[in-house]
Image: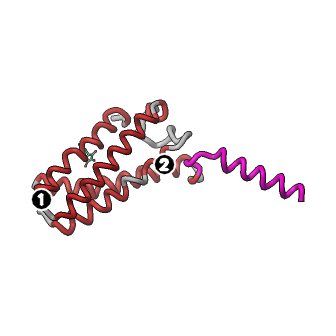
Amino acid sequence: MKKLTTWLLAAAVLTMAVPASAQFAKAEDAIKYRQGALFVMQQNFSRVAGMASGKIPFDAKVAAESAAVAEFMSKLPWAGFGPGTDKGDTDAKPEIWAQKAKFDDYAKKMETEMGKLAVAAKTGNLDTIKAAVGPTGGTCKSCHDDFRAK
Ligand code: ASC
């Protein structure tokens, strides 16, 4: 009994001590996870952006679906930026972990704009979508400028 209690206590302490990033078995998995999420988001965002700029024929249904996926994906990458995930096959700059509050702020802004873009895309109105694409892309860019190598 005492052994079990000790064990449970140790497990509980460990759980508390483990950061959110520990939902991943290895740092490498967290890196792949955030890259995967950002890639799927980017593919969907750039489809909508392509329609807004006239590079891709406008299809309201596809735009709305793509923007909805991009919005959903925008919530996911951040769990993959936990402590200890700064080294490996990544373009993420160490500044992310040194300036986490700033990074988190950029992340929130991006999520907010992706949300607005999804709302805009639901209207099916190309001009409304166009107006939302710029600010959304701006949030991608500002974070890349400060926190992504290359
Ligand atoms: C994209 C993409 C980005 C943003 C950015 C917008 O499609 O990959 O990083 O849009 O270029 O300025």
**Disc 2 crowd, CA 10 A, few/some/many (<14, 14-19, 20+):** many
Q: Is residue 113 left or right of residue 8?
A: left
Picture quadrant where residue 143 is located:
top left
For disc 1, the marked residue is 126
For disc 2, the marked residue is 80
User: Which mark identifies residue 46?
Assistant: none
**Disc 1 crowd, CA 10 A, few/some/many (<14, 14-19, 20+):** some
> Is residue 3 rendered magenta in the image?
yes
Distance from mark 2 CB to nearest ligand 1 atom below 8 Å: no
Q: Residue at x 15, y 66 (%)?
A: 59
Q: Residue at x 21, y 67 (%)?
A: 62
Disc number lying in front (2 or 1): 1
The residue type indicated by label 2 comes to Gly
Where is residue 105 drawn, in percent x and y? 39, 39
Where is residue 14 drawn, in percent x and y? 70, 48
The residue type indicated by label 1 comes to Leu
Q: Nearer the viewer, residue 123 or 60?
A: 123
Task: Give the magenta part as a residue range.
Answer: 1-22
